[in-house]
Image (spheres, grey):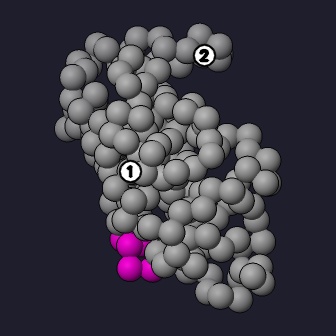
Amino acid sequence: MDSIAILTDIARRPGDSAEMLREQLTPQLLNSHPHHDNSVAWLLWHAAREIDVQLNALSGGEPVWSAAGFAVRFGLDVAPEDIGYGHTPEQARAIIVDDPGLLLEHLTAVIDAQVSFIETLSEADLSRIVDDQWDPPVTLGVRLVSMSADALEHVAQAAYIAGIGEHGFEPR
Protein backbone atom coordinates (compact mmCIF):
# COMPACT_ATOMS: atom_id res chain seq x y z
CA MET A 1 0.00 0.00 0.00
CA ASP A 2 1.42 3.39 -0.92
CA SER A 3 0.94 6.80 0.72
CA ILE A 4 -1.81 7.89 -1.69
CA ALA A 5 -3.83 4.77 -0.88
CA ILE A 6 -3.36 5.35 2.85
CA LEU A 7 -4.44 8.99 2.56
CA THR A 8 -7.48 7.95 0.53
CA ASP A 9 -8.42 5.40 3.17
CA ILE A 10 -8.15 7.82 6.09
CA ALA A 11 -10.02 10.51 4.12
CA ARG A 12 -13.03 8.20 3.73
CA ARG A 13 -13.22 7.16 7.39
CA PRO A 14 -15.07 10.21 8.80
CA GLY A 15 -17.86 9.72 6.26
CA ASP A 16 -18.05 5.99 6.91
CA SER A 17 -18.26 6.63 10.67
CA ALA A 18 -20.89 9.35 10.27
CA GLU A 19 -22.98 7.13 8.01
CA MET A 20 -23.14 4.52 10.78
CA LEU A 21 -24.99 7.13 12.89
CA ARG A 22 -27.70 7.77 10.29
CA GLU A 23 -30.49 5.86 12.08
CA GLN A 24 -29.88 7.72 15.35
CA LEU A 25 -29.77 11.21 13.85
CA THR A 26 -33.20 12.63 14.63
CA PRO A 27 -33.77 16.40 14.51
CA GLN A 28 -34.00 16.40 18.30
CA LEU A 29 -30.70 14.57 18.75
CA LEU A 30 -28.98 16.71 16.11
CA ASN A 31 -29.81 19.94 17.92
CA SER A 32 -29.66 18.90 21.57
CA HIS A 33 -26.80 20.08 23.71
CA PRO A 34 -24.98 17.63 25.98
CA HIS A 35 -24.20 20.30 28.57
CA HIS A 36 -21.95 21.83 25.93
CA ASP A 37 -22.43 24.38 23.17
CA ASN A 38 -21.55 22.01 20.32
CA SER A 39 -24.46 19.85 19.21
CA VAL A 40 -24.24 16.82 16.93
CA ALA A 41 -25.37 19.08 14.07
CA TRP A 42 -22.55 21.51 14.84
CA LEU A 43 -19.98 18.70 15.04
CA LEU A 44 -20.97 17.15 11.69
CA TRP A 45 -21.26 20.55 9.99
CA HIS A 46 -17.84 21.57 11.36
CA ALA A 47 -16.21 18.28 10.32
CA ALA A 48 -17.23 18.92 6.72
CA ARG A 49 -16.46 22.64 6.75
CA GLU A 50 -12.95 22.25 8.15
CA ILE A 51 -12.05 19.76 5.42
CA ASP A 52 -13.66 21.95 2.76
CA VAL A 53 -11.88 25.18 3.70
CA GLN A 54 -8.50 23.52 4.11
CA LEU A 55 -8.92 21.57 0.87
CA ASN A 56 -9.78 24.82 -0.92
CA ALA A 57 -6.54 26.35 0.36
CA LEU A 58 -4.57 23.36 -0.94
CA SER A 59 -6.28 22.88 -4.29
CA GLY A 60 -7.31 26.41 -5.19
CA GLY A 61 -10.74 25.11 -6.15
CA GLU A 62 -14.08 26.49 -5.07
CA PRO A 63 -15.32 25.16 -1.73
CA VAL A 64 -17.97 22.45 -1.95
CA TRP A 65 -20.01 24.58 0.49
CA SER A 66 -20.68 27.15 -2.23
CA ALA A 67 -20.00 25.20 -5.45
CA ALA A 68 -22.54 22.48 -4.66
CA GLY A 69 -25.11 24.85 -3.15
CA PHE A 70 -24.81 23.68 0.44
CA ALA A 71 -24.55 27.24 1.77
CA VAL A 72 -28.03 27.94 0.38
CA ARG A 73 -29.47 24.55 1.33
CA PHE A 74 -28.33 24.82 4.95
CA GLY A 75 -29.63 28.38 5.26
CA LEU A 76 -27.32 29.17 8.18
CA ASP A 77 -26.35 32.70 9.07
CA VAL A 78 -22.61 32.12 8.70
CA ALA A 79 -19.88 33.75 6.63
CA PRO A 80 -18.72 31.80 3.55
CA GLU A 81 -15.40 30.95 5.20
CA ASP A 82 -16.90 30.09 8.62
CA ILE A 83 -15.98 26.61 9.82
CA GLY A 84 -17.01 27.03 13.44
CA TYR A 85 -13.50 27.39 14.82
CA GLY A 86 -13.62 29.98 17.57
CA HIS A 87 -17.40 30.14 17.69
CA THR A 88 -18.87 31.83 20.71
CA PRO A 89 -21.45 29.77 22.60
CA GLU A 90 -24.20 31.74 20.86
CA GLN A 91 -22.74 31.13 17.39
CA ALA A 92 -22.31 27.41 18.05
CA ARG A 93 -25.89 27.10 19.33
CA ALA A 94 -27.14 28.95 16.21
CA ILE A 95 -26.04 26.02 14.02
CA ILE A 96 -29.39 24.26 13.87
CA VAL A 97 -29.94 21.57 11.25
CA ASP A 98 -33.01 19.33 11.26
CA ASP A 99 -32.08 17.21 8.23
CA PRO A 100 -29.54 14.48 9.00
CA GLY A 101 -29.43 13.56 5.32
CA LEU A 102 -28.22 17.04 4.44
CA LEU A 103 -25.41 16.87 7.00
CA LEU A 104 -24.30 13.45 5.74
CA GLU A 105 -24.62 14.48 2.09
CA HIS A 106 -22.45 17.54 2.75
CA LEU A 107 -19.79 15.52 4.55
CA THR A 108 -19.77 12.93 1.76
CA ALA A 109 -19.44 15.60 -0.94
CA VAL A 110 -16.52 17.24 0.84
CA ILE A 111 -14.79 13.89 1.37
CA ASP A 112 -15.35 12.98 -2.29
CA ALA A 113 -13.65 16.26 -3.26
CA GLN A 114 -10.79 15.50 -0.87
CA VAL A 115 -10.33 12.01 -2.32
CA SER A 116 -10.43 13.39 -5.87
CA PHE A 117 -7.68 15.85 -4.93
CA ILE A 118 -5.59 13.13 -3.26
CA GLU A 119 -5.86 10.96 -6.37
CA THR A 120 -4.18 13.71 -8.43
CA LEU A 121 -1.09 13.67 -6.22
CA SER A 122 2.20 11.85 -6.51
CA GLU A 123 4.34 10.59 -3.65
CA ALA A 124 6.70 13.52 -4.27
CA ASP A 125 3.85 16.04 -3.91
CA LEU A 126 3.26 14.93 -0.33
CA SER A 127 6.61 16.41 0.79
CA ARG A 128 5.77 19.91 -0.46
CA ILE A 129 5.64 22.47 2.37
CA VAL A 130 2.17 24.01 2.59
CA ASP A 131 2.51 25.92 5.87
CA ASP A 132 5.78 27.29 7.17
CA GLN A 133 4.23 28.91 10.26
CA TRP A 134 4.96 25.75 12.27
CA ASP A 135 8.18 24.14 13.42
CA PRO A 136 8.66 21.86 11.66
CA PRO A 137 6.87 23.25 8.61
CA VAL A 138 3.74 21.35 7.56
CA THR A 139 3.90 19.22 4.42
CA LEU A 140 0.98 18.48 2.14
CA GLY A 141 0.90 14.89 3.38
CA VAL A 142 0.78 15.94 7.03
CA ARG A 143 -1.95 18.50 6.33
CA LEU A 144 -4.10 15.87 4.59
CA VAL A 145 -3.70 13.54 7.58
CA SER A 146 -4.57 16.30 10.06
CA MET A 147 -7.69 17.28 8.09
CA SER A 148 -9.00 13.72 8.21
CA ALA A 149 -7.95 13.17 11.83
CA ASP A 150 -9.77 16.32 12.94
CA ALA A 151 -12.91 15.27 11.09
CA LEU A 152 -12.70 11.78 12.62
CA GLU A 153 -12.43 13.30 16.10
CA HIS A 154 -15.57 15.38 15.57
CA VAL A 155 -17.55 12.48 14.13
CA ALA A 156 -16.44 10.38 17.13
CA GLN A 157 -17.69 13.13 19.45
CA ALA A 158 -21.02 13.05 17.63
CA ALA A 159 -21.16 9.27 18.06
CA TYR A 160 -20.44 9.62 21.76
CA ILE A 161 -23.22 12.17 22.15
CA ALA A 162 -25.62 9.93 20.23
CA GLY A 163 -24.87 7.12 22.67
CA ILE A 164 -25.25 8.94 25.99
CA GLY A 165 -29.05 8.86 26.06
CA GLU A 166 -31.55 11.53 26.96
CA HIS A 167 -30.30 11.97 30.53
CA GLY A 168 -27.10 13.47 29.14
CA PHE A 169 -28.78 16.50 27.62
CA GLU A 170 -29.81 19.89 28.92
CA PRO A 171 -33.55 20.28 29.47
CA ARG A 172 -35.28 21.95 26.53
Judge left or right: residue 61 versus residue 172.
left
Instruction: Choose the circle earlier in sequence order: 2 or 1.
Output: 1
Question: Could you say which disc has been placed on residue 131 in the image?
Answer: none
Q: Mainly helix, strand or loop, the magenta region?
A: helix
**Mark 2: which secondary structure?**
loop
Query: Which one is nearer the viewer's eye here, 94 or 131?
Result: 94
Nearer mark to the viewer, of 2 and 1? 1
* Residue at the disc numbered 2: 136
Which kind of residue does numbered mark 1 sit on? His
Above or below, 70 relative to 172: above
Which kind of residue does numbered mark 2 sit on? Pro
**Mark 1: which secondary structure?**
helix
Judge left or right: residue 91 versus residue 113.
right
Image quarter where the C terminus lies is bottom right
Which residue corresponds to the image point at 62% horizontal and 42% vertical from the top-left? 78
- Counting from the top left corner in percent of width and height, residue 160 is at 57, 72
- Counting from the top left corner in percent of width and height, residue 39 is at 64, 64
Is residue 4 at all visible to an observer of this figure? no
* Residue at the disc numbered 1: 106
Q: Which residues are magenta?
A: 20-24
